[in-house]
């Protein structure tokens, strides 16, 4: 009666290469089997299966020790490359799944840069997630919110109040006191602080945005809290423009405290006394997010800034 045939390997698997590499590196079936955590007979059978699959002898069995044939040496050299690349790819995929790699697009309004939140936040995030690519673009906040809702932007730094689209949420990360910018020639400019009510007769300059948005809204709210409705006769595209208009005597401007770092000639910044209004800085992002990298960034913001701190 003929002896039963040994089962023939029919499918090439990555484990065959791992077994073969371990055998060649250990130069001994027993040590290689122990390294792999399998029985020695099982390892011997897997090596024979591999030889059947490639159709060539890989070991010179005329030798007592593990010796490779020419075909075996070629396979060993290539197998190490294949396994190393596979392991690197799997590691990369795991990093992607954990949000440790990928790309995030971030919008910001210019005034955020003066507060230090942008640089502080991104620096600490990149220290923790160095393989995530961050793309920054300065953008008007209502445009930011629209692009976040449409999936064209991942994250935004904005200055509420502003209407947030459906599917987008905003988290306040900083509350800044307000200051007043005055021309250095203004009678009150020599002090360190001022009651906003003392400026009720002034002309005010506001950002070029709707009255219920950003620090245009802050200006109206602060003046209302001081007991008057301000006269706003001019608007500026950004605070550099507004500060320049203040310097030449076109009016006064209310803004976040951090903007006082913009030291233009002819401008003085004074603290506001008895003022309950703050200029808030918030981060906006989608409520439902599929990107692990973006989720990691959102979690970083929550851990770093919630609840919002005072400036």
Image (spheres, rainbow, N blue to C red):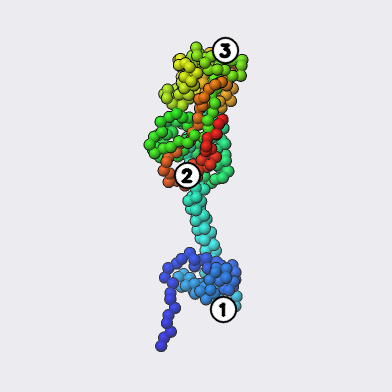
Q: For mark 1, what is the residue?
A: 62
Helix, strand or loop for disc 1: loop
Q: Name the residue under label 3.
A: 186
Nearer the observer, disc 1 or disc 3?
Answer: 3
Is 35 situated above or below 210?
below
Label annotation for residue 285: none
Q: Where is residue 153 in the image (x, y as percent from the top left)?
A: 44, 38
Q: What element carries label 2?
A: helix
Depicted 180 relative to depicted 131: above or below: above
Q: Is residue 220 above or below residue 157?
A: above
Q: Residue at x 59, y 67 (%)?
A: 25
Q: In this view, does 186 lie to the left or right of 106?
A: right
As helix, strand or loop, the secondary structure at mark 3 comes to loop
Residue at the location (49% across, 72% down)? 46
Quarter of the image with the C terminus in it: top right
Distance from label 2 to label 1 (Cα)? 59 Å
The quadrant where residue 145 appears: top left
Residue linked to disc 2: 295
């Amino acid at each position: 009666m003929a002896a039963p045939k040994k089962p023939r390997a029919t499918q090439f698997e990555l484990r065959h290469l791992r077994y073969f590499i371990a055998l060649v590196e250990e130069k001994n079936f027993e040590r290689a089997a122990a390294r792999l955590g399998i029985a020695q007979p099982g390892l011997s059978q897997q090596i024979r299966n591999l030889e059947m699959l490639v159709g060539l002898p890989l070991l010179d069995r005329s030798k007592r020790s593990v010796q490779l044939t020419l075909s075996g040496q070629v396979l060993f050299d290539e197998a190490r490359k294949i396994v190393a690349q596979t392991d690197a790819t799997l590691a990369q995929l795991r990093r992607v799944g954990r949000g440790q790699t990928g790309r995030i697009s971030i919008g910001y309004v210019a005034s955020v840069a003066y507060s230090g939140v942008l640089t502080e936040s991104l620096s600490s995030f990149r220290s923790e997630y160095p393989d995530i690519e961050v793309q920054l673009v300065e953008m008007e906040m209502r445009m930011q919110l629209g692009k976040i809702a449409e999936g064209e932007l991942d994250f935004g730094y904005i200055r509420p109040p502003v209407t947030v689209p459906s599917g987008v949420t905003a988290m306040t990360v900083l509350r800044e006191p307000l200051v007043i910018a005055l021309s250095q020639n203004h009678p009150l400019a020599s002090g360190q602080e001022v009651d906003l009510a003392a400026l009720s007769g002034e002309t005010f300059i506001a950002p070029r945005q709707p009255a219920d948005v950003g620090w245009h809204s802050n200006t109206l709210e602060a003046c209302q809290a001081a007991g008057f409705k301000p006269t706003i006769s001019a608007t500026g595209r950004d605070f550099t423009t507004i500060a320049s208009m203040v310097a030449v005597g076109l009016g006064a401007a209310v803004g976040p405290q951090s903007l006082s770092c913009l030291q233009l000639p002819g401008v003085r910044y004074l603290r506001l006394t008895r003022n309950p209004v703050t200029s808030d800085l918030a981060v906006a992002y989608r409520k439902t997010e599929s990107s692990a990298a973006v989720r990691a960034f959102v979690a970083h913001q929550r851990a770093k800034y919630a609840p919002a701190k005072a400036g």
